[in-house]
Image (tube, helix red, strand yellow):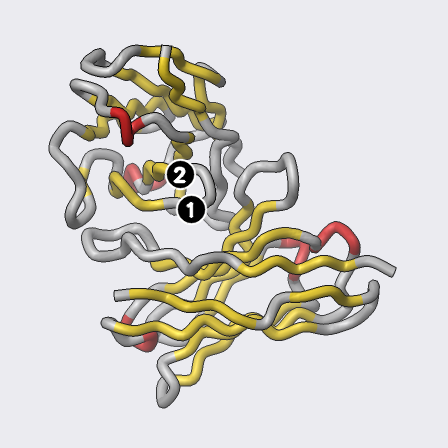
Amino acid sequence: EIVLTQSPGTLSLSPGERATLSCRASQGVSSNSLAWYQRRPGQSPRLLIYAASSRATGISDRFSGSGSGTDFTLTISRLESQDFAVYYCQQYGTSPYTFGQGTKLEIK
Amino acid sequence: VQMVQSGGGLVQPGGSLRLSCVASGFNVNSNYLSWVRQAPGKRLEWVSIMYSDGSTKYTDSVKGRFTISRDNSRNTLYLQMNSLRTEDSAVYYCARHPSYYGVDWGQGTLVTVSS
């Protein structure tokens, strides 16, 4: 199975700053089928990005995804208070559709 | 658009449970829908998927024990879980496959397998 490794484990930033989160796959992700999710405390995950770089419906353009093959990045520009949460990547190109371990974005 | 789950609970090892996920705002038979779980302290784990054509896939650890299905008339997705093990204890979520409109997850339902 494809193992996804996210880095850093925790990212401490201030509102207004830019966040860069990484997701590395143990082998190439088929058709760049890579998604990013946000999870706030007490809530279910919410899809932000699919197909590595496409924003889902209703998602702010402050969220952007990039990358291909084995290396993917989620960038959040101009952090707002509601952005501080845990972020997960998922590959859905090859079954089983695995998740990363998460990056916690916390307020500095 | 929402997905409302039910059916979790406490069950003994070897027992069975059926999870339900009622969808509103979209048709289950025209979407790819998955079950995902998260055990305490562990990462999210994809469990199973049903594609719009009715085909299915499972993660290895549940093959032969879990069955995903849907009832189009009820617009509901199910996960029948048999021969449950302690390691199946987790919060289970139903989820739409990642896509432009596929943002929805259910609220989660707790399954505890314990004697």
Residue wearing tag 2: A39
- Judging from the image, what secondary structure is the residue with disc 2 in? strand
State which chain disc 1 sits on. Answer: A
Q: Which image quarter holds the C terminus of chain B?
A: bottom right
| Residue A32: % across, % down | 29, 37
Which residue is at 15% across, 47% downward?
A: A58
Left or right, A66 with reference to B11: left
Give above or below for B100 relative to B24. above
Residue type pointed to by label 2: Arg
- Number of the front mark, 1 or 2: 1
Q: Which image quarter holds the N terminus of chain B?
A: bottom left
Give above or below for A52 relative to B52. above
Left or right, A96 with reference to A93: right
| Residue B45: % across, % down | 55, 46
| Residue B66: % across, % down | 64, 68
- Judging from the image, what secondary structure is the residue with disc 1 in? loop
Left or right, A9 with reference to B8: left
